[in-house]
Image (cartoon, rainbow, N blue to C red):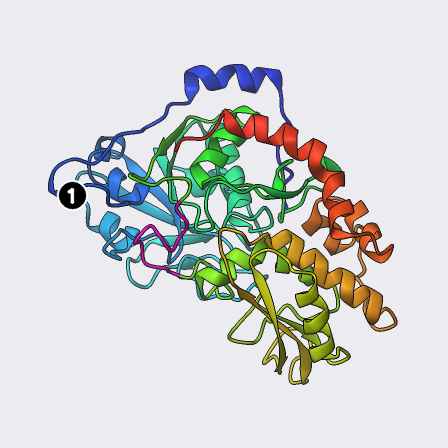
Amino acid sequence: MERIRAFSRRSLLGVATASTLATGTPVGAQARAGRVLPGLDVLLGPKRALLTGKRVGLITNPTGVTVKLESAIDLMARARDFKLAALFGPEHGVRGDAQAGAAVADRVDARTGLSAYSLYGTTRKPTPAMLTGLDVLVFDIQDIGARFYTYPWTLALVMQAAREAGIGVIVADRPNPIGGIRVEGPVLYPALASFVGAYPIPIRHGMTLGELALMMNTDFGIGCDLNVVKCTNWRRTDDGTKTGLPWVPPSPNMPTIDTAFLYPGTCLIEGTNLSEGRGTTRPFELIGAPFIDAPALADRLNKRNLPGANFRPAWFTPSFSKFQGQLCAGVQVHIADRAALAPVDAGIAILLDVARHHGKDFSFLPGDPPFFDKLAGVSWLREAILAGESVDAIKSRWQPELAAFKLKRARRLLY
């Protein structure tokens, strides 16, 4: 991937004059009192002047919809006061039809006839040729709230490309579906930066994509001309079950809100030879392998009394990905209390148990560095799991960096 540009004093000094913040509240019939509206509704309503008379490039996917489930692509393509000139798609593509990790090619969007450039193919950063003739880039994608989801890093590269091209970026913000309060996990070491984590933030960051954009622009020195259009009436305590907004799967393996809640912990399974449930109807909720004793694993995990989580013995046969066509045994993670759930704890507890009781069969995937280390953001977590450290001991090791991040985070919160 393109290397994220390092922080520089010069670029940071330019942010104060180059970056602006759109924070208007919808008025009139467009918004009922107290109703949560995504930033897209605000941008196409009271903040529409940000687009008027401009040629617009839109970075989006199927989650780019209004509160009425109207597509941003369709609405912008019909606009007469500005011109939608190009589309850009992240991992899974503009229409969300590509599986995880699959390269996506540039194409012509069949519905609009516009060029749909891929930012998850031969290039992950918009090229100057892609941006020729554009006045502004609009980024409207639902994030999940976990560092290893790739959409924030697509946004970072879009912001870099926009700064280099001298055009602005508008982020149409959306609520964090797993809430904006809890922050969990180790902070990424810069040496492990990748497309599943490019900047030093923890696994669960508790921020919206707009807030992350402000942090990347200022604290990490991108320094583009940035506008964040806030969603309205969202409170940090409101997760995706309380906003009233419809759930549109942000990617093929994120089918439900429960999947999103568990993802910050169970995505760590991807860095091992265990199945994380891809190829089933419950990815990141079903965890297992052919060599696991399902009832014994569930019993041991339930005895840990992990907050907000229960474990049920489960058997499943993935239709693709790891152990395709093979019967796997393991657990389904059930959420008993979303507010109490600590998904990173749960993911680590599963790995600790399997490493201890199935050490001859269990392994971390090879690599230099191992993929697990890229997901975790640190190398010591893998080593601590193999050493059999307790969850509490492991958590204590990331607290100093996490505390420092929280102070930085507090300066960028919009809600």
Position of 147 compared to 365: left or right?
Answer: left
Tag 1: amino acid: Gln
Name the magenta segment's main secondary structure. loop
Query: Is residue 220 visible from the viewing direction of this image?
Result: no
Find residue 349 and report its horizontal and vertical position in percent: 71, 59
Please state the extent of the stretch shown in magenta in the rendering: 238-248
State the residue position of label 1.
30
313 over 193 or under it: above or below: below
Quarter occupied by residue 43: top left
Asked whether 258 or 369 is in front, the reply is: 258
Position of 362 compared to 128: left or right?
Answer: right
Position of 125 compared to 352: left or right?
Answer: left
71 over 99 or under it: above or below: above
Asked whether 217 or 129 is in front, the reply is: 217
Asked whether 375 or 287 is in front, the reply is: 287
Query: Is residue 212 visible from the viewing direction of this image?
Result: yes
What residue lies at 16% left-to-right and 43% top-to-bottom? Answer: 30
What residue lies at 68% left-to-right and 80% top-to-bottom? Answer: 329
What residue lies at 53% left-to-right and 38% top-to-bottom? Answer: 156
Quarter occupied by residue 307: bottom right
